[in-house]
Image (cartoon, helix red, strand yellow):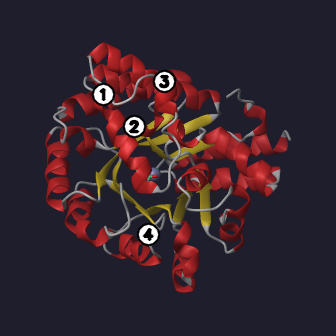
Amino acid sequence: MITDPGRTPPSVELHVHVEGTLEPELIMELAGRNHVELPFRDLDDLRARYAFDDLPHFLALYYANMAVLRTADDFAAMTRAYLERAAVGGVRHVELFVDPQAHVARGVALEAVVDGVAGALGDTAPGLGITTGLIACFLRDRPADEALDVLRALLAAGAPLLGVGLDSAEVGHPPGAFGEVFALAAEAGLRRVAHAGEEGPPAYVWEALDVLGAERIDHGIRSLEDPALVERLVRDAVPLTVCPLSNVRLRCVDDLGAHPLPEMLRRGLRVSIHSDDPAYFGGYLDDNYRAVTAALGLSRDELARLARHGVDAAFVSPARAAELHAGIDAWRGAG
Ligand code: HPA
Ligand code: ZN
């Protein structure tokens, strides 16, 4: 997709899964390089599978496609491709999710994952003017003991982590089971975020806050169903990282015109917008900005407000936040 950075604000990406940036072309290239047999004939046959009924349906393809990621170089190539695309779309700061368990569980060394992703963040992002952090997510549909083992291994290896998160199939997997994992992460000085209220009920958002100590909620769109929860989120200014194109592609909302984003803003929630799994859901962060602008008629001021919320929600120094805010204000003023 051709991008026009002038029409979307300089932005902060807080909700993107690096494995969700693995584009079909790179899947084919890595499959060839690593001699991985894929369960589809060609690129067209792969692309035909990108229509999803719900989150578990998407996750089946997302995990299957990871089979092509074998070496640190593969993880680095995926990460670099993402950073380059993000820079073109005006992204200035990224807190990147990675799913280490998904790779360790299929026999890839934890070091290959961390060295590849963190190495590419370190060698590529500065030249693009992007600051970064890495957030290791745990898979809520796998045992909490396994998550604890992976967290201990990450800490023992000195992985350069900013924080931890919680993702994968939500319904039937409430956050509370991961209390010990998040407590250990907090003890280790890591920031904590969690997916909640994407497909799951508001009760999962409460648990993410109260049991995990989550500092940000990823998605959280179902919070609107519970007025007491909205009050809590507004009172504590809890950031919600909302992913509009993802919500449509996973059928959490019927279409973009019906997205609860405007209502969330009206209620005073700290919403920012993000791309989730851009290679799967039809667009990167700038594409999400353009799509909500077209579907919801957001003004330049409203776009700037969303972008500023992203900065406020980012785990950055006050000095970096001031730089990022200044970039957004300059963009708004130039409109
Ligand atoms: N939701 C939950 N887990 C995920 C997602 C998502 O959209 N993408 C990758 N893991
Ligand atoms: Zn996500």
Reply above or below: 102 against 297: above
Pointer 2 residue:
19
Pointer 1 residue:
69
Left or right of 31? Residue 23 is right
Count neighbours of disc 1 (C-alpha within 10 A) and say few if under 14, some if 14 to 19, many if 20 or more: many
Pointer 3 residue:
43
| Residue located 43% across and 72% down the image | 205
Q: Would you identify the image quadrant in which residue 22 lies? A: top left
Q: Residue 253, how many percent across, how many down? A: 61, 62
Disc number at residue 59?
Answer: none
Q: Nearer the viewer, mark 3 or mark 2?
A: 3
Q: Amino acid at mark 2?
A: Glu
Q: Residue 241, how many percent across, how many down? A: 54, 57
Q: Amino acid at mark 4?
A: Gly
Residue 237: in sight, yes or no? no
Q: Are marks 3 and 1 in contact (CB under 8 Å)?
A: no
Q: Are marks 1 and 2 in contact (CB under 8 Å)?
A: yes
Residue 57: in sight, yes or no? yes
Left or right of 2? Residue 184 is left
Report if the beta carbon of the residue with label 2 is closer than 8 angstroms to ligand 1: yes
